Amino acid sequence: MVSSGAGQYLNSSLFIGNNYVYLEETASTNEYLQSLNKEMKLPGGTVISAGYQTRGRGQAGATWESEKDQNIMLSVLLYPKFLKTTNQFALSKAMALAARDFILTFLKDLPVKIKWPNDILVSGQKICGILIENGIKGDQIDYCIIGMGLNINQIFNDGHRASLKSITGIDFDLRETETILFSCIEARYLQLRNHEATISADYLETLFGLNQKRWFKDNINGEDFEGVIKGVHTDGRLVIETDEGEKIYNMKEITQRLTLSSNEG
């Protein structure tokens, strides 16, 4: 285990990554950070990064798989006490935008979109997943742990996932590249504190499938249907216009297909 600011690399962030722990291997960076923060009150911006996770987790109980020392896998601790629990999805928007900003640093000319709620897609292929876990106290968020998995150097052959290397052909220094991510996270977090409306507008503008007819699967009844994403409620629920009228879904209730509707060709 290595504990430092951000290792030997220059970290230009004000607080993200200033308290930094690197683990060669751990079950889950989110779980490790959660446990460590219970033992001692850690400063906001603390980062736990790992070369390998034996039990990496994604959204809705999914697993996050990554080869050892090939990708960025980290968790960040924040204290967004300025957010009420009814508005906690605003943080998810901000972190998705931060991850997108990071990807755009290297892939300026490619379509980089946010797939609801906070996956990042490049040309329709997943390059980043985010898992956010909040500690609640009353009607406020006491603390928040943001887990991010970003595909950097691993090559995927499944047609569904991409990495920076698979697109650019470049091998990236993971620890150096992390410091760019820290700056992106910090910038969007500070923007959330002061200009939440901008976060919401930017999120909607970059939402994958917005105003396009696409296929969805209703995970409650198992049926596929066509619909058009019209927006996202402040509580994070997805608004879809269907032939039967407007419907609203929580995350586990629906799966969005990456293919267009049959009417779109």
Image: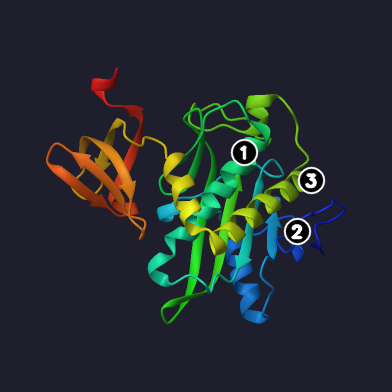
Q: Earlier in the sequence, mark 3 or mark 2?
A: 2
Q: Is residue 186 left or right of residue 55?
A: right
Q: CA distance from mark 3 to mark 2?
A: 13 Å
- Please tell me whether mark 1 sits on a helix, a strand or a loop: helix
Asked if the residue at tag 2 contacts the one at tag 3, i.e. Cβ–Cβ closer than 8 Å, the answer is no
Amino acid type of the residue that numbered disc 3 sits on in the rendered structure: Glu
Q: Is residue 14 left or right of residue 223?
A: right
Amino acid type of the residue that numbered disc 1 sits on in the rendered structure: Ile
Seen at 35% across and 27% down, the residue is 259
Front-most of 7 and 186?
186
- Whether residue 159 is visible, yes or no, is yes
Q: Earlier in the sequence, mark 1 or mark 3?
A: 1
Front-most of 152 and 93?
93
| Residue depth check, mark 3 versus mark 2: number of the one nearer the observer | 3
Q: Is residue 255 left or right of residue 226?
A: right
Give residue 215's position: percent from left, percent from top: 28, 33
Front-most of 233 and 169?
233
Asked if the residue at tag 3 contacts the one at tag 1, i.e. Cβ–Cβ closer than 8 Å, the answer is no
| Residue wearing tag 2 | 22
Amino acid type of the residue that numbered disc 2 sits on in the rendered structure: Tyr
Seen at 56% across and 54% down, the residue is 56
| Residue wearing tag 3 | 176
User: Residue lying furthest left in this view?
Assistant: 244
| Residue depth check, mark 1 versus mark 3: number of the one nearer the observer | 1
| 126 to 178, vertically: above or below | above
Seen at 35% across and 61% down, the residue is 235
| Residue wearing tag 1 | 103
Give residue 182's position: percent from left, percent from top: 69, 53
Q: CA distance from mark 1 to mark 3?
A: 14 Å
Location of the C terminus by quadrant is: top left
- Whether residue 58 is visible, yes or no, is no
